Image (cartoon, rainbow, N blue to C red):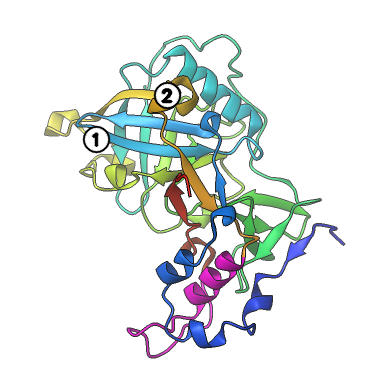
């Protein structure tokens, strides 16, 4: 038996807000959150990818799940390694990939070229708020510290490839990817990638700037310069912690331990607002996007 502690979000389904849920939308459920229900993401865990035209994607890094890969990414960012990087692959309903592609630029000091395969971790001691619906890829699924998580029969757990997930591109195994080349999911959740690639973060803002880019016509969505397809240049890739405090963006996620999250999870599974006549009675893990907002002072 695994001894991880499970928080039953489903336990609130028949609590005192039955009358509220009949007409409540997910957005209205989030509005019921109290200030203490929101958790601020540390500045050192925010990777800011700035494209031309003032377009920014903010990614939250996941050092608790892929510590070596994330340490590499921080070194790449702090050293200016990604100068001249671009988004060179945009595959429809799949991924946008960015970096320097086949550059021979040396790694910064301290980068581990081929980290351990940080694809899973032990589920031991993992606090989990259950999804409350079956998951086709795992024994059980839910949320832990704001991340969508799957737990498997062998006692391991992994982050999951949902829309906006940030992963470390790699070659064939045993290569694990250093984090120099990154990809973001811009389509339907490719959960078959779970446990096969290091998930290093997720988009918390601006993913539309990647998902709206023109698709590449080459194999796997690589952009073909001979056809006039141009890679989108990246102005900078930095950690928020490297900026002056008054210039740092800041974001918060809704704690899965809160009553507001339980309400939100319930109405994502069972829509009772005016548009819906038939509640689904369940929900896929990646259809419950953990609510994120810019940090506020209230």
Residue in view at x 57 percent, y 9 percent = 109
Q: Quadrant of residue 2?
A: bottom right
Image position of 86 with respect to 270: above or below? above
Q: Quadrant of the N terminus?
A: bottom right
Measure the C-alpha gap from mark 2 to mark 1: 25 Å
Q: Is residue 205 magenta?
A: no
Residue at the spot of label 1: 223
Image position of 129 with respect to 146: above or below? below
Residue in view at x 46 percent, y 43 percent = 251
**Crowd band around label 1 with a 10 angstrom C-alpha radius: few (<14), some (14–19), many (20+):** many
Confirm whether residue 175 shows in the render: no
Residue at the spot of label 2: 238
Give the mark, 2 or 1, whose residue is nearer the N terminus: 1
Confirm whether residue 231 shows in the render: yes
Residue in view at x 65 percent, y 77 percent = 12
**Crowd band around label 2 with a 10 angstrom C-alpha radius: few (<14), some (14–19), many (20+):** many
> Which segment is the magenta one?
259-283
For residue 152, the mark is none
Observer-nearest of 227 and 268: 268
Residue 84 vs residue 52: left or right? right
- Residue 71 in percent (x, y) is at 60, 24
Q: Is residue 269 magenta?
A: yes
Q: Are marks 2 and 1 in contact (CB under 8 Å)?
A: no
- Residue 243 in percent (x, y) is at 42, 21
Image position of 39 with respect to 88: above or below? below
- Residue projecting furthest to the front: 298
Observer-nearest of 184 and 101: 184
């Amino acid at each position: 038996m695994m001894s991880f502690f499970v928080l039953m979000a489903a336990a609130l389904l028949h609590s005192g807000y039955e009358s509220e849920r009949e007409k409540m939308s997910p957005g209205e459920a989030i509005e019921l959150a109290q200030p203490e229900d929101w958790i601020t993401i540390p500045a050192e865990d925010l990777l800011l990818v700035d494209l031309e035209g003032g377009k920014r994607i903010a990614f939250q890094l996941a050092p608790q799940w892929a510590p070596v890969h994330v340490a590499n990414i921080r070194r790449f960012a702090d050293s200016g390694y990604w100068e001249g990087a671009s988004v060179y692959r945009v595959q429809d309903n799949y991924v946008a990939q960015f970096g320097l592609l086949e550059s021979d630029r040396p790694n910064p000091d301290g980068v581990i070229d081929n980290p351990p395969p940080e694809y899973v971790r032990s589920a031991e001691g993992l606090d989990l708020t259950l999804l409350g619906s079956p998951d086709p890829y795992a024994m059980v699924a839910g949320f832990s510290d704001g991340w969508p998580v799957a737990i498997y029969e062998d006692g391991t757990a992994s982050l999951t490839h949902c829309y906006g997930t940030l992963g470390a591109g790699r070659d064939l195994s045993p290569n694990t990817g250093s984090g120099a080349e990154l990809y973001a999911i811009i389509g339907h959740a490719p959960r078959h990638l779970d446990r096969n690639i290091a998930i290093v973060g997720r988009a918390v803002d601006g993913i539309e700037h990647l998902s709206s880019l023109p698709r590449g016509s080459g194999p796997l969505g690589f952009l073909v310069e001979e056809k006039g397809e141009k890679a989108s240049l990246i102005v900078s890739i930095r950690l928020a912690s490297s900026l002056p405090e008054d210039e740092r963006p800041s974001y918060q996620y809704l704690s899965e331990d809160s009553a507001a999250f339980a309400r939100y999870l319930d109405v994502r599974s069972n829509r009772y607002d005016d548009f819906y006549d038939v509640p689904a009675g369940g929900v896929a893990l990646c259809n419950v996007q953990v609510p994120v907002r810019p940090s506020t002072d209230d």
